[in-house]
Amino acid sequence: MVDVGRMGDDFQPGPRRGTNQTGVRLYNERLVLSLIRQHGSLPKANLARLTGLSPPTVSQIVGQLEADGLLRKEAPRRGRIGQPSVPLSLNPDGALSFGVKIGRRSCDIVLMDFVGGIRRDLHLAYPFPSPEPVVEFVKEACGAMLAGLTEKEGARIAGLGIATPFELWNWEKEVGAAPGAMQGWRGFDLQGEIARHFDFPVYLCNDATAGCAAEYLFGRAAKYPEFLYVFIAWFVGGGLVINGNLFPGRSGYAGSIGQMLVPVERPGNRGEFRPLLHVASIYNLEQRLTASGGDPASVSQDAGWPTIAEDVMEAWIDEVAGGIAHALVSASALIDMQAAIIDGAMPTAYRTRIVERVREKFEALERTGLPPLSIIEGLIGYRARAIGGASLPLLAKFMRDRELLFRDPGDLRGAGFLPFLVVLDGLGGLGAFDQIFQDHLAGLALVRTALIGAGKFGSMFLSQVPTITGLEVSAILDLDPERAKNACRNVGWDEARIARTRFTTKAADIFDDAYVDVVVEATGNPAAGIAHALAAIDARKPIVMVNVEADALAGPLLARRARERGVVYSMAYGDQPALIAEMVDWARATGFHVTAAGKGTKYLPAYHQVTPDGVWAHYGLTPEEAKKAGMNPQMFNSFLDGTKSALEMAAVANACLLDVPDDGLAFPPCGVDHLPTLLKPAADGGQLAGDGMVEVVSSLERDGRPVFRDLRWGVYVVFRAPNDYAAACFKQYGMTTDASGRYAALYRARRSRRFRYPWSISM
């Protein structure tokens, strides 16, 4: 499967629009590269039109990509009027990558340039694959190719991608290996064993999905945002592209049509079915050749298939086409796709015959109620899987990837906050966020939101809606609709806005509502929150989870479910867990090791004895003032006694893959100047039981005195310098460090909290 640690577990679809902001330059650069790859050479004016970016922004991006050697200018083209345009194209020398195809009969290695050209290639045939010889071949072959590169070319290596069938140990019988001969693959860390020989990233993917990647980047797939890819090799495999993005699925098996059952095409068949992999396969052809007295070795890649008898070939083509046609009908019932692209490890003439026959048989099958399907011949052929392997680094580093804006970058993270917003706020000093936000909304249709829970925090969001162009609340779900209406009146909604908003107590009303684009869960009830999140995800509606109680309990599972359904599950940006996760991501993205992350609060052990009846005295409020403001005493009591902090730290630990203290949060009294001194491992003189942990610091000393320069309302991250030079920079730039200078901290003393919720909803 795809190496989700580096690439993400799928390639999330998204609109082809950019954002005028240097903090998301990486996304915009990939968008420009992807559009040029799709459309061919383009002048800057066309790029501005296709991306929705301003011409000056496009000029800056193009200039950077040219400086990076990824784009090059072509000869000017003069039109009928005006200045000549200068088309920009991908520079073949912009990046190089290795592709390794490990098959049941052979191993192929290619060195590919940025536009899919093969610079070097090597082929190794074997009776069956064994782990150690394959790794040795890859090491030696890639090493020899690297040795032949110039220093400049070597610096352009983007990585190495491995395309291989999964569970190779299950194919002993089919390849003719002795029992147990291929069991060395079981548990073998192929990716890790190859990666340790090189200093560039190594990616791993199912071989058929890799072939789909090759067709997606370099074949005939550009005009088909949704297609099923079929590759006929030793056995048949497949891949999926959905919404213009390669979709390997949660485990890397998406599009694996080989296990589909298809009817046996012979007279008198009474319901006999076989897996497609036993029908549409070169293994099947080898078996036919053996039975007819032919030479099965004649169908190897090296042989070119010159001596196969026509009757044998015709019968095989007919059976293959029939099986694929039935599989495509079944697939069409599940996936509303535009095309099926069929390729294979075979001479072009035979592939063409198979595709033509598939079209004939597909048209003859019963397809009432199914969408039309274009059946297209693939372009790549034998090398599709090796080229697909080499495509993996390009997909990871240079192709449009909406994950950069909207996806949780970890595999099992909890509620993934929206990294786009994180980058903008985390860099600080960028200014003009209002213009960026409004530019984004201007590029969208109206964003229609359903709010679940119109309590205090829901009301804070509702108070902002009338002043944000392009954002509407179309429905509010609350146990008491009249209370919800009064909450809207209290925050300044006029009667006309209230009248056009649906108020309901039935959850199904909002999840089935076509006029709801995004769901905001703000009940604070974990059971209800989980149920609402699951319903939203199943209804394919993005959900913003204000309910940290639900996220702490089930965030990773909900995030995984959302990824499987292709929707966004997000923390509410502005809430402390999302702000902490932002700082953690900043530290990790800049190469630092995160030692601790968390927040500050007002805490004393004695607060465990406070009850909701007496909580308002600790906030300087009377019960009447709190009630008038819609403040829940039970909720605010949880803020005081540490319960809410514990829940938030659980959510942060889930989202950022941080550890939690075995004995619970310690709430050590700590001001901002001592964060890196206290919040490091005890082995280095700090107070943490381990490394990479969450912790909450108190704004009060244990005797009740205020901590100097406390962090009561803020968030922080403590990180470690990777080397002496970085540690020296900490000191030179006045960062807060411990005595050693190796540990430093960044903190945000105040935050605008939930007034930032609209960013998560609209972006």
Image (cartoon, helix red, strand yellow):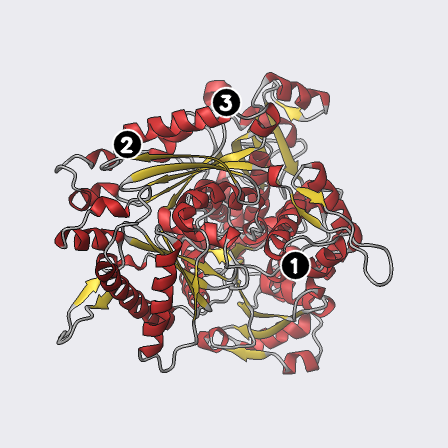
Crowd tier of the residue under label 3, counting other residues whose Cα lies within 10 Å: few below 14, some 14–19, many 20 or above: few
| Residue 720 location (% of width, % of height) | 56, 25
User: Residue at coordinates 36% horizontally, 52% vertically from top-left?
Assistant: 347
| Residue 91 location (% of width, % of height) | 64, 42
Mark 2 or mark 3, which has the lower sequence index? 2
| Residue 467 location (% of width, % of height) | 74, 67
Mark 2 or mark 1, which has the lower sequence index? 1
Q: CA distance from mark 2 to mark 1?
A: 44 Å
Question: Which residue position holds label 3?
Answer: 147
On the question of residue 712 being in view, the answer is yes
The label shown at residue 17 is 1
In the image, what residue type sits under mark 3?
A: Ala
Question: Which residue position holds label 2?
Answer: 131
Is mark 2 in CB contact (under 8 Å) with mark 1? no
The label shown at residue 90 is none
| Quadrant for the C terminus in the image | bottom right
In the image, what residue type sits under mark 1?
A: Arg
